[in-house]
Amino acid sequence: MIASLLFTWQTFGQTNLSNDTLQWNENRKLSWNDFKGEPLDYTGFQGEAFCMILANYERPNIFAKTTFNVIAVFDRTKSWVNPNAKANNGLLYFQIMFDLYELHARELKKELSETDFGNDLNGVFQQKYNSSMTSLTNEFNEFRKETRLGQDSNTLAVWNKKTQEKLTLLCNYK
């Protein structure tokens, strides 16, 4: 199965999430019903998953503690699959993608919680965020290459196990 993933990262406010998005949840895996977008036959792909890491912070005043919100989100209306391409390996491939987003969201939460922002909260936050997205992009490209875009089921299983182990290690940052 040939598949791709669109990378998006941005900061967000409380009202920017669509009702047709899924926030990553360990008790809720992706299903083919989550791919509600119109298939794009001209792309050469059999499907796409649209995932995002959304991040923001709040600090009501200079004396208040800064709180961070970082979430991994799957957009159902922008994700699609060719009906003839639905296979277990394909769904696992997309789930591991979404899991990688959650993994990097947790890593960013951890890093933000350990950072001294000094007098440049916005600048340091943006630098940490950008660095996290670069790391995600690099790992995602490695995942795509090693799994041959989800066609290598043995390598998919290895990536799934490795990603689940890393998520467990960062369970304090759900």
Image (cartoon, rainbow, N blue to C red):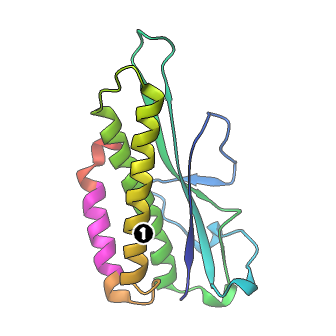
Locate residue 20 relative to residue 66 in the image: left or right.
right
Q: From what the image shows, is residue 149 above or below residue 102?
A: below
Q: In which quarter of the image is residue 62?
A: top left
Q: Is residue 6 left or right of residue 156?
A: right
Snapshot quadrant of residue 16? top right
Q: Which residue position holds label 1? A: 140
Residue 73 location (% of width, % of height):
55, 53
Viewer-closest of 69 and 86? 69
In the rendered image of this protein, does residue 154 appear above or below residue 70? below
Residue 99 appears in the rendering: no
Residue 27 within the magenta-colored segment of the rendering: no
Whole-percent x and y of residue 61? 49, 11
Give the extent of the magenta segment. 156-167
Q: In which quarter of the image is residue 160?
A: bottom left
Callout 1: few (<14), some (14-19), or many (20+) C-alpha neighbours within 10 Å?
some
Which element is circle 1 on?
helix
Residue under the point 51% across and 77% down: 91
Residue in the picture at 69% in, 64% down: 78
Q: Where is residue 169 in the image (x, y as percent from the top left)?
A: 23, 52
Look at the image and tell me whether residue 119 can be seen: yes
Is 109 in front, or is 21? 109
Q: Residue at x 67, y 35 (%)?
A: 15
Image side of residue 87 versus residue 147, left or right: right
Q: Is 159 a magenta residue?
A: yes
Quadrant where the C terminus lies? Answer: top left
> Whole-percent x and y of residue 44?
66, 88
Amino acid type assigned to the residue bearing label 1 in the image:
Phe
